Structures are given as structure tokens and as C-alpha cells.
Image (spheres, rainbow, N blue to C red):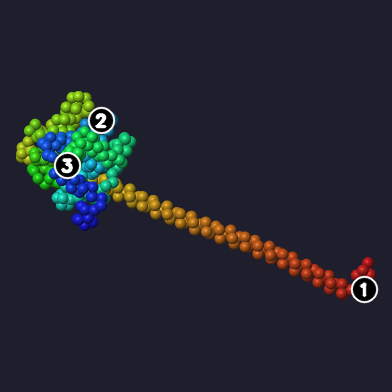
Amino acid sequence: MSARSTYFNINTSPFWLMHLACFSAFFIEFSWWYVLLAVASYYLRMFFITGGYHRYFSHKTYSTSRVVQFIIAFMAQTSSQKGALWWAAHHRHHHKYSDMEEDIHSPKEGFWYAHMGWILSPENNATQYEYIRDLTRFKELVWLNEYRYMPVVVYAVAMFLAFGLPGLVWGFVIATTLLWHGTFTINSLSHTWGWQRYTTTDTSRNNPILALVTLGEGWHNNHHRFQASARNGFFWWEIDITYYVLKTLSLLGIVWDLRPVPQYLLDSNHESWIKNGTATIANAAEVAKQRVVVAAQSATQTASELAQTARTSVEEKVDVMKEKVDVVKEKLEESKEALAAQAGMLKESAKHQAEEIATKVENAVENALPVPKEKLA
Ligand SMILES: [Zn+2]
Ligand SMILES: [Zn+2]
């Protein structure tokens, strides 16, 4: 698919129409309250993306109840970034193959492709259910994932009902469009702009500006180093608002079991690590481990695919043989019948001939006698 048709086609038209619709703000009398509304609507839903889609559904960095889990998924889906299960599956895939050939949003494919080309491409539209077996047992999440745009409509209508036309334009259209690009920076800018504290197998960076734009996700190099923690800002000076909100929710008992950053990643700062070499060794081991896991996975897959192919071809051959045997059986049956018919005919004609000969003998005997047979009696 050419670059132009990836970005501009009938399926991506709603995305671009939303951008166009942002200009409708010029037809409404300006007020700073509307700007505040857009900012609030942006950050409210950014929290559900980072704290929900990312730190809960993708990485399971804390626990919560089934009801709260549904509310999180619903609120995150008002962002119009497809379904919670779709998001989690694609994100797990990203961590598994970060910046490798399979990574669907590596900046190695081009900055704009990593930013939004990948999400606009129809080939990434399906939910990769094999990555989220732990989530598909919740039928309500699967249902919500299928009706991915329903929460978007609910949110837009709510904004309109609450704040009228400015609510729809500033609270929904502008806020949602900005929210797209704010979220997309994680895949584009967070893999190109900033610095790396940890040596990881990918291009992830730490960046305080992006951390403010994305409520803490800008500490992306930290996150790629250790994904299982509920916080991405590992140190107190790394502002991570998503974590502060999660921490508050845990004090209220709404979420629990926030998974911490392991002490060994905090104890030594990176420079001293590099000096004594532990980091290098630990990271090399980690890299090797990840590669082995990926290789093992693909080997198992290939093996099972080969086995499947072999099984199918054997089954097919057996079917063909069976058909042939049936044909032979049928032919045998037919020739048996034909032979029986022939034998019957032969028997019949032999009998007939024997009778004829008997009659002839009888006649001959009769003719040979000097007086008729009756007279002899
Ligand atoms: Zn990443
Ligand atoms: Zn992640």
C-alpha cells in the first residue's frame, strides 16, 4: 500500500474529519472556560488510557474489581482509540517485538508511520486475541471491544447535553483529536526524543515533556526496562501523574496490589552500574533471554505448523486411498455379477445342448430299429 493510501482513504476519513471539525471553534465565541474544558476532557481520558489501557489491561500492574475494570475500559474507549482488548493485544505485541521487524509501530518504519500510520492501516484493525487470553474470559470486555465506538458516541452526547455546542466542539472534538496525538507520541517521540537511562533492546527514551503530555508515559525507557511496575517515573523527580492517581485510588480501596519498581533498579544509578559492569551483564542476559524466548516461540509455532501440514497431507492421502479402494471394490462387485451371469448362461446353453443331443440319440435309435418301437412293446 502506498504511503498516501495508508493515510488517506475512505476508512481514515472520520479521523481527518475530526481534525477539520476542530476549526468549528472559530465559529463559537471564545472563552478560556472552553479551553479549560478541553484540557480537562483531554487529561481525564488520558488517565484512562495510561492507567487503564496501558498499566492495567496491557501490563496488569495492579488489581481491581470486575466492575471497576469495566468502567476503566468504557472510559478509555471514549478516547476513540479502538477497544480495550484491541489496545492491550497490540501493545503486548509491541513489547514482545520492540523495534524488531515484527513491531507494528517502530519508528524504524518512519516517524509518521510509528505515530499514526500503523493505527490507520486496515491490517492492524483486528484484535489479536491470542495475546490477551487472560482478558477474553470477561465476556463484557469482549462485548465492549466489539462495540468499540459506542462509548465515543455516549461521551460526545454527554458533552453536548452538559455544555451545549461548545461542549461538543471543545470538550469532545478538539480534546479527542489532541488526545490521539498525545497518545501517539508514545510510539513516535518516546522512541526518538529523549535519553536512555537503561540499555534496552529498543529505542525507548525518557522525556519529562512527554511525561507531562501523557501523564507519566514519557518515562518510556524506564517502562521498557521494567514493564510490570505501576509507576513509570521511577524516582521522585520523575513526575508520573497516572501513578499518583492510582496511588490515591489504592488508598480509597478502589484498586490494590500496585506493583512496585524493583529495588535493584533504584539502588544504583545508571552511571555506577555501567562502571561496575553489572548493568551490562544483566542487560546482556536480559537481551539474550528475550531473543531466546522469541526464537523458542517461533520455533514452537513452526513445529506445530509443520505437524499440522503433515497431518493434513496424510489425512488427504488416506482419503484418496479410501476412494480408490471403494472404486476397486465396486469394480470387483460388478465383475462378480457379470461372471455369475455368464456362468448362468453357459449352464443354460450346456443343458440345452445336452437335451438336443439326447433327442438326436433317441431319434437315431428309433430310426435304426427295423420295427417301430411301439410294436416292440
Ligand atoms: Zn515503546
Ligand atoms: Zn507498555
Residue 253 sits in quarter: top left
Kindly check if marks 2 and 3 are in contact, taking CB atoms under 8 A apart as contact: no
Q: From where the camera sits, is residue 226 visible?
A: no
Q: Quadrant of the N terminus?
A: bottom left
Mark toward the viewer: 2 or 1:
2
Q: Earlier in the sequence, mark 1 or mark 3?
A: 3
Mark toward the viewer: 1 or 3:
3
Q: Which residue, given by chain and number where applicable, does mark 2 sit on?
A: 68
Position in image of residue 180 (x %, y %): 18, 43
Whether label 3 lies within 8 Å of ligand 1 gets the answer no
Position in image of residue 158 (x %, y %): 23, 35
Q: Earlier in the sequence, mark 2 or mark 1?
A: 2
Amino acid at pointer 3: Ile
Q: Quadrant of the C terminus?
A: bottom right
Taking depth in this image into account, of 376 and 254 the one nearest to the observer is 254
Amino acid at pointer 2: Val
Q: Secondary structure at mark 2?
A: helix
Label 3: few (<14), some or many (≥20) within 10 Å? many
Mark toward the viewer: 2 or 3:
3
Taking depth in this image into account, of 360 and 267 the one nearest to the observer is 267
Taking depth in this image into account, of 186 and 30 the one nearest to the observer is 30
Q: Which residue, given by chain and number where applicable, does mark 1 sit on?
A: 371
Q: Which residue, given by chain and number where applicable, does mark 3 sit on?
A: 174
Residue 162 sits in quarter: top left
